[in-house]
Image (cartoon, rainbow, N blue to C red):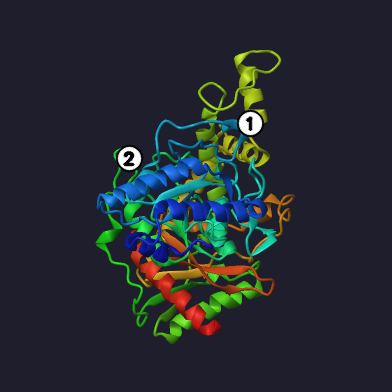
Amino acid sequence: MALPSFANSRSALLNGSLTAVELAQLSVETINKENPHINAFTYVDADSVCQSAQSIDERLARDENLPLAGLILGVKDVLSTTEWPVTCSSKILKGYRPPFEATSVARLRQAGALLIGRANCDEFAMGSTTEYSAYGVTKNPNNVKYVAGGSSGGSAAAVAAGMCHAALGTDTGGSIRQPSAFCGVVGLKPTYGLVSRFGLVAFASSFDCVGPITQSPYEAWQILCHMSGTDPNDATCIDYSPEKSAYSPDMPIDGLRVGVLSEYYGEGLEDEVHHLVDQTAQNLKSQGAQLISVSMPHIEYGIAAYYILAAAEASSNLSRYDGVKYGIRHLGDEESLESMYVQTRSQGFGFEVKRRIMLGTYVLSAGYYDAYYGKAQRVRSLIRQDFEEAWKKIDILLTPVTPTAGACIGEWGNDPLQMYLSDAYTVTANLAGIPAVSVPVGKVDDGLPVGVQVLGPPMSESRILSVGQRIMELADTVVS
């Protein structure tokens, strides 16, 4: 028996036809069947899952209000949980068990969500394919010759393969939206600061966002409402609840001002992807939306600015992994402190992480700081201003998520620049701190899904998710 949808699981749980323990067993059985050839999960402890499920059954028996009871949730291997190790898919954190839990995870657990396992990811969330993982590559459930995307590839693949209802991912430059597009599911990057980062192992602190990957925009909205809000453990967290603005699956499209960004339709965009994005725009127009061409003159510098700034922050954040406080320790032949640092990091970090640390150290070094890091920060401000000007003319922005529908396993291994360029349409939302969602709209000839991206002003999650729901419905109507 396949795992029912979240809505059906919740209904069965509340009417007594299924228990949380039985739902947990169904999920574990699906993982045991699907995971060996997809590699979406790196850690599943069936005993602890059943214990948590038993606790949910007991809480329901006491008539506790558990709005997310019935939700089976995967957790990316960069978010701390007290009962499982967190390794960031890296050798350097092998065996590390955090003494605290991520606020986002704790809030969902309190609302009744059942945590099922650790989802694979690129090491320390650095990558776009989930090939840079100490646990091996995650494959795309739609075509196992292709990558699932990254860095939240395990989370997206797990949802797409029906192993869980939803999964938490993190988005630093597109790492929720890009794998969601590749796998054909919904991926939401919230407004920066809307969801607490406490308990998230940092990659680039001024970019990192925790968000849900789901089967539908409504499920993403439900999860977001329960894990957002101010947190005394995170000074960057916004005192705002998305429940203040209502999600509407029947949101009228008539009069909606949809921005089409000319800079995103140039060289490198595959024809099939371009066609599906154009078709989506025309579907909205047919419902009364206004298509408005907008230009953002500084968008073309987004990739360069992002990879300078993110690498700089990563080089600082990852300096804490030295073999002293946690994780593995290699003393080296000389048995000196410096030798321990060198050997621990050399053997613990993977190639892509080392590359970004070196890049970040370079752009922060004396003599290059102003030429690279300082200039990238100024570009970031200009891109934010471009968006602020655009919101005066439009309500949402519609763009591709990625230039291509996917990449074969190993295709980008010898060409990191091509991998970095795959984030060209997603990094700008992180630079500006605005929300964005990827929703599936169709497939290309080889069966790979294609997603479109809807962006909005800060705290407009309800609007972009509502529009995303309508986009999916209109795409289904066209296909049928």
Q: What residue occupies the far front of the structure in this picture? A: 17
Could you tell me residue 478's position as x and y percent?
Answer: 52, 84
Q: Nearer the viewer, mark 2 or mark 1?
A: 1
Q: Residue placed at 27% from the left, 60% from the top?
A: 243
Q: Residue placed at 63% from the left, 66% from the top?
A: 405
Residue type marked 2: Ala
Q: Residue placed at 47% from the left, 59% from the top?
A: 165
| Label total for image | 2
The answer to which image quadrant residue 349 occupies is top right
Say if mark 2 contacts mark 1, CB within 8 Å. Answer: no
Q: Is residue 90 above or below residue 16?
A: above
Is 337 displayed left or right of 291 in the figure? right
> Which residue does the numbered mark 1 point to in the structure image?
348
Closer to the camera in the image, 66 or 118: 66
Closer to the camera in the image, 61 or 194: 61
Q: How many C-alpha atoms fall within 10 Å of the one at disc 2: few (<14), some, or many (≥20)?
A: few
- Give the secondary structure at mark 1: helix
Q: Is residue 115 above or below residue 101?
A: below
Tell which circle, 2 or 1, labels the residue nearer the N-terminal end: 2
Is 422 displayed left or right of 397 in the figure? right
> Which residue does the numbered mark 2 point to in the structure image?
235
Q: Can I make out residue 301 in this image? A: no
Closer to the camera in the image, 8 or 187: 8
- Give the secondary structure at mark 2: loop
Could you tell me residue 172's position as x and y percent?
Answer: 50, 49
